[in-house]
């Protein structure tokens, strides 16, 4: 029989190295397209080999036997695709000497399955399943879990392993980072009143509208921060420009970011708390919109009755903020993994959390509402805690922080365990180590799973006496059958009603601090509050007030140049820059504006500078208003 992998006449032969293939039909007619096709297939195989090698390297697989290479494509059956360990054709030849290709039945019988290759004569979708191939007892998930379960932080060769992040559900549930920007203010207008029977109408330009602000508002219909995974940028609407006839520009619309109650918003740069939202409908402004620029009607004075000057709108603030969700609930259900917390929540409320017989079924908190005697209590199922949770073990930080907003705790214990008291004491210790206030919260104990066996029921009765001696209110329940859950809820309600009213001191403090956020950082600052830095490139002037002044200056008008020169003199900046060593022609940077320093303050020099800037503007540049009057 003919070997299907034998190269036909006139075709290229690939030996595992892209530089080693040659064409046996370099001469003769009709071989050009075949050579080109063969070369294309070889290059494709080489690229696939490089990709698989990079993948193997990323998985830290070392040694020649762990390298992947594409086999020969130049076979009569062009649809046959396969991947082999080793070095290209050499691996195929070795396999051929051992008896040919392996069938799928042989692969399923292969115990190891890791050093073999898989052939797919179809569309190539099942070319090879990494870590084990078809039929392997240790597939990709098993190998990956084995890789993750190593807690020493190092691989087999002693190299440090990359840190792993939070699971997707947790990362998107209670933390998010977004970009917010307030709207820019609108430009002021330079216009003059031209109306019949109104001689010398005077300036008539209106002011620009204020930009929209960014608000955060608590909404009880939202229970996680997952929606911010796809919506990262939030921008308010800028204000409209002013118009003639003293028409004020329309203010930009505010942007309201809806978040679940219990969200804390921090500035990503310095971790400063900007706002903390507690109850439904609680709304706070985080950054205000930019101020609208003034039109020439606002610059009219007794000495300057026809001003030809207007301002740009103030740029809106923009920051990255980090949000953290701390659930606001009346009752927090805590316990070790697989103790029956989710089952208890589903038993006493209409919530439908995920329930399964393995630890860490719940990795994000679940909420449920209990109505009793016309009173509503919110229960929160906190994911399972482990010993060492206060140090971050088992994602303890992510789980424990949700207990801070609860008013009382229900500690669920698994009575099928032989170490119930040790588990209880360990979790109590972690609560105190994490936050003493959390450890001091009122607590009830639920001795769960008494329906599992007679031994568990007897252990629960014994533990009830032990907790009674400790002064802890313990209840024997079965969350699965509902036994004792009604009595537990009644006891929880009595403790909940005895608690003092909720302290709104934190909210009042946030409202007081919110007043400081309603103004721009430059508001209340003086123009002479600045510093000068001498760098190799330029003299840099820093100061929030002077930077805003320069940014709002509309350089299209000559009077803006004269006004800027006067401000430099009155604020003392001219003397300070000169004292810093600035000479004629040196660069000076204020905010985003750069100019050349000159001590010549004559009006003619200023006009020449302004005129040269106007001449250097590109043709078709937008004209922001009328420069000459009368027309």
Image: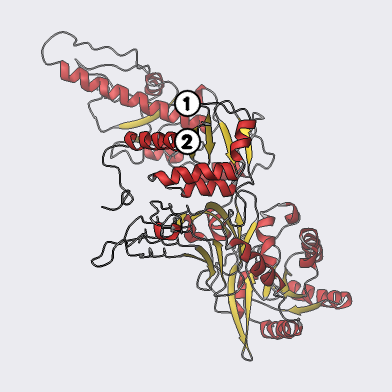
Q: Residue at x 64, y 91 (%)?
A: 373
Above or below, 570 relative to 170:
above
Query: Alpha-carbon distance for marks 2 and 1?
Result: 77 Å
Is residue 249 among what the camera can see? yes
Q: Colour mode?
A: secondary structure
Q: Residue 351 in the image: x percent, y percent?
A: 55, 75
**SS under mark 2:** loop
Is residue 69 among what the camera can see? no
Q: Residue at x 34, y 25 (%)?
A: 45
Q: Residue 104 in the image: x percent, y percent?
A: 38, 39
Residue assigned mark 1: 67
Q: Residue 244 in the image: x percent, y percent?
A: 32, 61
Count the labels in the image. 2
Label 1 neighbourhood size at 10 Å, few (<14), some (14-19), many (20+)? Answer: many
Q: Residue at x 61, y 74 (%)?
A: 345
Please identify the quarter of the rendering in which residue 434 is found.
bottom right
Above or below, 92 relative to 188:
above
**SS under mark 1:** loop
Residue assigned mark 2: 602
Answer with mark 2 or mark 1, whichever residue precedes in sequence.
1
Please identify the quarter of the rendering in which residue 279 is found.
bottom right
Q: Is residue 94 left or right of residue 164?
A: left
Q: Is residue 45 left or right of residue 222?
A: left
Q: Residue 284 in the image: x percent, y percent?
A: 57, 68
């Amino acid at each position: 029989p003919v070997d299907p992998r034998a190269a036909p006449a006139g075709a290229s032969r690939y030996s595992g190295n892209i530089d080693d293939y040659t064409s046996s039909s370099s001469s003769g007619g009709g071989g050009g397209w075949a050579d080109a096709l063969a070369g294309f297939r070889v290059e494709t195989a080489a690229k696939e080999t490089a990709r698989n090698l990079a993948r193997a390297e990323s998985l830290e697989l070392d040694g020649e036997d762990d390298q992947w290479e594409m086999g020969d494509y130049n076979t009569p059956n062009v649809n046959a695709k396969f991947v082999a360990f080793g070095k290209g054709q050499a691996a195929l030849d070795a396999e051929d000497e051992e008896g040919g290709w392996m069938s799928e039945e042989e692969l399923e019988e292969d115990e190891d399955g890791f050093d073999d290759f898989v052939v797919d004569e179809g569309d190539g979708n099942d070319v090879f399943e990494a870590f084990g191939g078809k039929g392997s007892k240790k597939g990709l998930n098993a190998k990956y879990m084995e890789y993750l379960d190593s807690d020493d932080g190092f691989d087999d060769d002693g190299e440090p392993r990359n840190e792993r992040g939070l699971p997707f559900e947790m990362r998107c549930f209670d933390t998010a980072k977004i970009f917010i920007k307030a709207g820019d203010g609108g430009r002021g207008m330079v216009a003059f009143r031209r109306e019949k029977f109104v001689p010398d109408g005077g300036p008539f330009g209106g002011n620009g509208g204020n930009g929209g602000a960014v608000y955060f508002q608590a909404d009880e219909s939202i229970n996680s921060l997952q929606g911010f995974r796809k919506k990262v940028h939030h921008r308010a609407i800028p204000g409209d420009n002013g118009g003639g006839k003293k028409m004020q520009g329309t203010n930009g619309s505010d942007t309201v970011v809806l978040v679940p109650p219990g969200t804390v918003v921090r500035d990503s740069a310095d971790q400063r708390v900007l706002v903390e939202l507690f109850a439904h409908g609680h709304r706070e402004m985080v950054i205000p919109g930019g101020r609208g620029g003034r039109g020439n009607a606002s610059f009219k004075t007794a000495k300057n009755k026809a001003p030809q000057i207007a301002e740009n709108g103030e740029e809106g603030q923009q920051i990255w903020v980090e949000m953290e969700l701390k659930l606001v609930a009346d009752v927090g259900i805590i316990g070790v993994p697989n103790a029956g917390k989710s089952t208890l929540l589903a038993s006493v409320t209409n919530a439908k959390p995920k329930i399964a017989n393995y630890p860490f079924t719940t990795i994000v908190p679940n909420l449920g509402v209990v109505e009793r005697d016309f009173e509503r209590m919110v229960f929160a199922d906190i994911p399972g805690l482990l010993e060492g949770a206060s140090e971050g073990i088992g994602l303890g930080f992510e789980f424990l922080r949700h207990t801070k907003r609860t008013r009382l705790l229900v500690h669920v214990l698994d009575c099928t365990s032989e170490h119930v008291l040790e588990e209880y004491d360990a979790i109590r210790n972690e609560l105190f180590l994490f936050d003493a206030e959390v450890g001091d919260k009122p607590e009830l104990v639920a001795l769960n799973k008494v329906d599992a066996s007679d031994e568990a029921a007897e252990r629960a009765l014994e533990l009830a006496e032990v907790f009674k001696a400790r002064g802890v209110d313990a209840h024997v329940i079965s969350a699965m059958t509902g036994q004792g859950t009604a009595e537990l809820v009644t006891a929880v309600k009595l403790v909940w009603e005895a608690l003092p009213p909720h302290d709104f001191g934190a909210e009042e403090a946030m409202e007081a601090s919110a007043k400081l956020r309603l103004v721009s950082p430059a508001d209340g600052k003086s123009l002479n509050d600045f510093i000068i830095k001498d760098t190799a490139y330029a003299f840099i002037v820093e100061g929030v007030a002077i930077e805003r002044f320069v940014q709002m200056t509309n350089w299209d008008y000559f009077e803006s140049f004269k006004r800027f020169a006067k401000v430099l003199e009155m604020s003392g900046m001219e003397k300070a820059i000169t004292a810093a060593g600035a000479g004629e022609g040196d660069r000076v940077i204020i905010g985003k504006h750069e100019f050349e320093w000159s001590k010549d303050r004559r009006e003619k020099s200023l006009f020449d500078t302004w005129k040269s800037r106007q001449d250097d503007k590109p043709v078709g540049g937008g004209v922001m208003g009328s420069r000459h009057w009368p027309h």
